[in-house]
Amino acid sequence: MAKFRVLITVTTYPLPSRSYDELVCTAGVLEDGSLIRIYPVPFHFLEYHKWEWVELELIKHKHTHDFRPESYRPKRHDLSDLVVVQKIGTEQAWYVRKQACLKNVYTNLTTLIHDSKDPKNVSLATFKPKRLIKFIVEDDEREWKEQWLEQLKQVNLFTGGANATEGPRVPVDKIPYKFKYQFEDEAGKVSTMAIEDWEIGALFRNCLAAAEGDEVIAVEKVREKYEKDFMQNKDIALFLGTTLKHHRARHTNPFTIVGVFYPPRQPQQQLL
């Protein structure tokens, strides 16, 4: 058990899993640039603390439960010992964020997948694609399956609260679409991965509310950001992570996109 200083960079949208405590997790960067996964975390954590340096006590997950070297759990499930040290802004084209997040970057997906196998078992990585090819939107199941609803209840994944001002307590919305990026790595390998982070799910929900329930408009707003803005104007890197289920099964590619890093693209003369 030890106290860690972590820059929170990723919070994932709730995903069903065999073990309910894996539903909600977050990830971040340590001061040496290595990555760390923290789960389970309370639901309210998902909406706060991103891009904050925090300090808290963490315990390594037992190898029999989670063999991935980056996986830790909070000593205190309610995170009552968490201290916010510093908020990191976007000044100077995300300079400080880039200094923290881009110390160890993969550019070859084959190399990363090789490192995900024994003995390294890498399960979190910052990945810089050679280029993003396209943003993909696919229909998905519209409602949580009954067994997944039970999992959500076990980890208290509800919006609203007991107070009338907070609205009724209902399970966090199921996003009825899969959002994906297709991209090419430095070797020309083309891959398509789902984007599973909290940010894109929250964006869809906010756009849906603003559009008074019109999903066509909401999806178009998400597309405007992740396709038209990000692909044209941002210097994208991807935070990739594995689920325990897929990693343990040694899938051909166990990774999904758990976060998108999108500093502004710099004019060429500023990069020289």
Image (tube, rainbow, N blue to C red):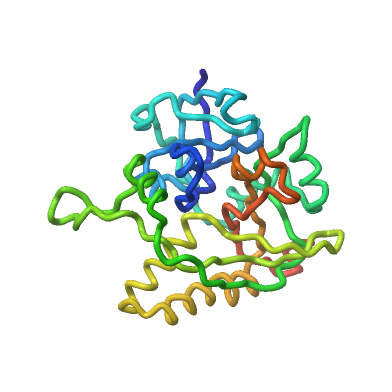
Q: Name the residue located 77 percent from the left edge and 46 percent from the top edge.
A: 112
Residue 70's spot in the image, x, y percent?
Answer: 62, 33
Residue 241's spot in the image, x, y percent?
Answer: 63, 46
The mark tally for this picture is 0
Q: Is residue 167 left or right of residue 262?
A: left
Which quarter of the picture shows residue 236? bottom right
Say which of 60 and 149 sits in front. Answer: 149
Q: Is residue 36 left or right of residue 210?
A: right
Q: Is residue 34 left or right of residue 19?
A: right
In this view, 140 is above or below 26: below
Residue 218's spot in the image, x, y percent?
Answer: 43, 76
Which quarter of the picture shows residue 208? bottom left
In this view, 37 is above or below 131: above
Q: Farthest left residue?
A: 164
Say which of 85 and 239 sits in front. Answer: 239
Which quarter of the picture shows residue 214? bottom left
In this view, 208 is above or below 169: below
Residue 113's spot in the image, x, y percent?
Answer: 77, 46
Q: Name the residue located 76 percent from the left edge and 32 percent from the top edge.
A: 120
Q: Farthest right residue?
A: 187
- The C terminus sits in image quarter: bottom right
Q: Name the residue located 39 percent from the left edge and 31 percent from the top edge.
A: 82
Q: Name the residue located 47 percent from the left edge and 58 percent from the top edge.
A: 199
Q: Farthest top residue?
A: 1
